[in-house]
Amino acid sequence: MLLKYIIYAKEVRNVDCIFCKIIKGEIPAKIIYEDDKILAFKDISPIAPTHILFIPKEHIESVNFLENQHIDLVGEIILKMKEVAAKLGIGDEGYRIVNNCGNLGGQTVGHLHFHLIGGRQMQWPPG
Ligand code: 5GP
Ligand code: ZN
């Protein structure tokens, strides 16, 4: 598609991407946290009492598309997940951070995201 990517003040968005549409406010979501680089919102189909998705505002398809320039961004996302978990009162009891990458990894949305899942006992191994 010719105009697949749109650049908003340094940030790249993909017009076909549902998470980019959430960033733009075109699809509603329950926002938990937002800054200039990161958005966190409730998963539409939660698998636990707490299930929040953390995404970069830059459209990056998956971990496979990360490069050196994204090191700080990914670090900030993980630290923000820790901070939000603590604010929600699940920091000490523990939680799970999940990233699904590609088809066999179970990724269903092609915009990098990290799941913060908590509020119940997790099992291992995952499915
Ligand atoms: P994945 O399977 O790619 O790791 O995770 C994608 C997640 O996005 C799933 O847990 C799914 O429930 C969630 N999701 C898909 N579409 C939407 C949506 O439109 N809004 C929200 N809030 N979550 C979504
Ligand atoms: Zn996107």
Image: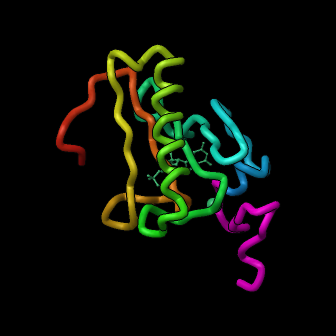
Front residue of this view, candidates 70 and 113: 70
Residue drawn at x 39%, y 61% is 101
Q: Residue farthest to the left?
A: 125
* x and y percentages locating residue 124 in the rendered image: 18, 38
Horizontal arrangement in the rendering, residue 13 relative to residue 56 (left or right): right
Residue 16 lies in the magenta stretch: yes
Residue drawn at x 46%, y 29% is 82
Residue drawn at x 39%, y 66% is 102
Front residue of this view, candidates 85 and 43: 85
Residue 118 lies in the magenta stretch: no
Q: Read off the magenta span.
A: 1-19
> Which quadrant of the structure image shows residue 43?
top right
Horizontal arrangement in the rendering, residue 70 relative to residue 27 (left or right): left
Horizontal arrangement in the rendering, residue 122 relative to residue 68 (left or right): left
> Which quadrant of the structure image shows residue 96?
top left
Residue drawn at x 56%, y 63% is 60
Above or below residue 62? Residue 42 is above
* x and y percentages locating residue 80 in the rendered image: 53, 34
